Amino acid sequence: MGRRNTETSRAATAVRAEVLYTGPEPALSHIIPTPGVPLNASAPFQEEQVPTTIPLLPGEHTMARRARFALVNACTLASLGLGLLAIFLAMEGEPKAAAGCLVACVVFDGLDGALARKLGVASPFGAQMDSLADMSSFGLAAPVVVYASLVAHQVPHAAAALACALVAGCAAIRLARFNVSPKDGRFFCGVPTTMAAAVLALAVLIDLPLPGMVVLAGVALLAFAMVSSFPYAKLARILRLPPWLWLLPVVGALVLEPQMMFVLVVATYLVSGPILWVRAKRA
């Protein structure tokens, strides 16, 4: 009798195992536990939550708007591609050609934002794309190009690498802070990465007649200016300066060497931040 009961029990266990391992019942195939959500006796399973897809382009999705959206993002990708090309050229020992690519990156970076606003296709996706492209072109490509130029001017490799790593780190901090900070229509908080990259690229292109270690100190100063809290005027505000002020750099370039006039203009812009900060504190 005991033997018969054991065989019956084994048979029942085998039947249960077969039911258990041949897959879920059709009625329950669409119900799975939700990870991270505690289960209880009254509701042992919860239906799967399908994530909501957020459209990349807010608003009406007409062919014309999609084409405009694609054009704007093509400018962003062009900036990214030119930054990559700049790295390749710097690795081949062509820092001036690489610096030319960086100047083109600056142009495309300004173009994509202006087009997005003018064509009415500005979006959070585009803003994130622009930030990522800026980090690639201005936070990584620009330091690589500057490193190649510094090494070509007999600056010690370790010192050049340290200064360029500082530029990359400060650019990352600057871009992350910009993404989460409220925007001011008049001033930047710190020197923007685009302007810093433009200054570095132009400095390589015109081949500043300064000792390598002086240029190295300037690179480090520009990096710290990016993460400073000093207010720096935006380009639109600078363009509204009196016309006679624009004549000063032209006259200076004729009297002095153009390279030295470039240094003076950059130094004036860097000093303007602390001056504006002090004036704001006194007001």
Image (cartoon, rainbow, N blue to C red):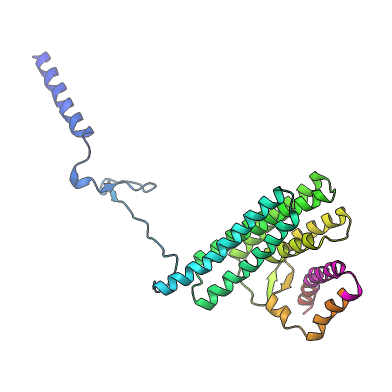
Percent coordinates x, y for residue 108 in the rendering: 61, 67
Percent coordinates x, y for residue 20 in the rendering: 21, 34
Can residue 139 be seen here? The reply is: yes
Residue 119 higher or lower than 266, as above or below: below
| Residue in the foreground of this view, choosing between 178 and 133 | 133
Which of the 4 image quarters holds residue 251? bottom right
Q: Quadrant of the N terminus?
A: top left
Q: Which residues are magenta?
A: 254-275
Q: How many labels sit on residues?
A: 0
Magenta stretch holds residue 271:
yes
Residue 112 higher or lower than 247, as above or below: above
Tell whether 109 sits left or right of 59: right
Residue 11 higher or lower than 84, as above or below: above
Q: Tell me what residue is drawn at x 79 percent, y 49 percent.
A: 160
| Residue in the foreground of this view, choosing between 265 and 43 | 265
Tell whether 131 sits left or right of 215: left
Percent coordinates x, y for residue 38 in the rendering: 35, 47
Magenta stretch holds residue 6:
no
Tell whether 212 sits left or right of 53: right
Percent coordinates x, y for residue 42 in the rendering: 25, 48
Farthest residue, direction left: 1
Farthest residue, direction right: 255
Can residue 173 be seen here? The reply is: no
Q: Quadrant of the C terminus?
A: bottom right
Which of the 4 image quarters holds residue 61? bottom left
Secondary structure character of the magenta stretch overall: helix
